[in-house]
Amino acid sequence: VKPLRKGRPLFDRLALIGIGLIGSSIARAVKAKGLARTVVCTSRSRTTRERVRALRLVDAVAPTPAKAVERADLVIVCVPLGAYGDIARAIAGKLKRGAILSDVGSCKQSVLRDLKPAARPGVHFIPAHPVAGTEHSGPDAGFAELFEGRWCILTPPKGTDRRAVNKLKAFWRALGGHVEVMDARHHDLVLAITSHVPHLIAYNIVGTADELRAVTKSEVVKYAAGGFRDFTRIAASDPVMWRDIFLNNRDAVLEMLGRFVEDLTAVQRAIRWRDGPMLFDLFTRTRAIRRAVIAAGQADNPPPATKARTAKSRTGQDKAARLAR
Ligand code: NAP
């Protein structure tokens, strides 16, 4: 793949199926960088389709997935994992020869199962997962810099055309990301421990606090700065998206959760037996991991280098919508 010159599109026609936080961030970045001559999208609801038109995020809004993928040379599915089967049925046989069919879903083995049937011979099927996001949803929540400095993991099935993989790599790099190629099963294990189990812990601890009787809800909110507030941000993530992640990455999450519960029991024991050295050793090890995350530039959301630009690039309309949420 030749290095990208600004203003030279990598793709002729990009179709986005679903245009919430992730789809609209892709649309904004592609438009800002001129990575596709035409960007088309579709969304399930008329409300979102109209909102996208009002925000002028894309060149055309199609009424259905089948219409959106017509003549597209890159199709990216950006809907919750539970909707992939319906989308696959809607676009099966409609993609043009030589097109790349990709997605942004948070786990990858289920995507191989659910979306692959839509890729007839001659279509390059390359699942992808940008490891970037926020707790917000919908087309108003997206921003062009979301992927800058973040990793995008591609999980092409064995035998996928190398040129097509390289082209998709170039696309994600042009969006500002780093790219890694991985086996889908390994992806799901890695993400289970780095993303899915942490979200489950946040949902669970906020749920536990909600059900307490001895501590009132107003006290939980009032004293949130003691640590609870960081969990509430994660636990505010989209319920549909996260329900679908746990239903579709079941095995990897259960495997990692099993280990987590064992380790939690060990900590519980250490507290019961006043084992200070065990607690101190654990907290020292974990502190080193936080430092490694900071050193890798993955601690802020969005990364510090993009924060200022993100603030500047948001339109007045975006800001108004954000304030209204
Ligand atoms: P989002 O903001 O909630 O947007 C979801 C989009 O999918 C909207 O266009 C919505 O359409 C459409 N949609 C929802 N349910 C649907 C259904 N049953 N059938 C057809 N279309 C449906 O979601 P998002 O955060 O962009 O997430 C999209 C994908 O990205 C998910 O697979 C998620 O796993 C992955 N992902 C998310 C993050 C993150 O942090 N959010 C990070 C990485 C990857 P309407 O608005 O018209 O209903």
Image (tube, grey):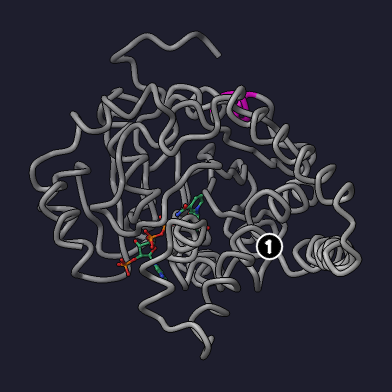
**Image quadrant where residue 118 sits:** bottom right
Q: Which residue is mark 1?
A: 110
Question: In the rendered structure, which segment of residues is drawn in magenta?
Answer: 163-167
Task: State left or right for residue 285 relative to residue 156.
Answer: right
Task: State left or right for residue 285 relative to residue 316.
Answer: right
Residue 119 rendering spot, x and y as whole percentages = 59, 53
User: 150 or 15, which lies in front?
Assistant: 150
Task: State left or right for residue 29 relative to residue 180.
Answer: left
**Image quadrant where residue 217 sits:** bottom left
Residue 40 rendering spot, x and y as whole percentages = 28, 46
Quadrant of the image where one finds ligand 1: bottom left
Task: State left or right for residue 286 relative to residue 75.
Answer: right
| Residue 307 position (above or below residue 316) | above
In the picture, the quarter occupied by the C terminus is bottom left
Secondary element at image label 1: helix
Q: Residues within 10 Å of mark 1 (few under 14, many from 20)?
A: many
Residue 241 rendering spot, x and y as whole percentages = 49, 66
Q: Amino acid at mark 1?
A: Ser
Residue 127 rendering spot, x and y as whole percentages = 61, 46
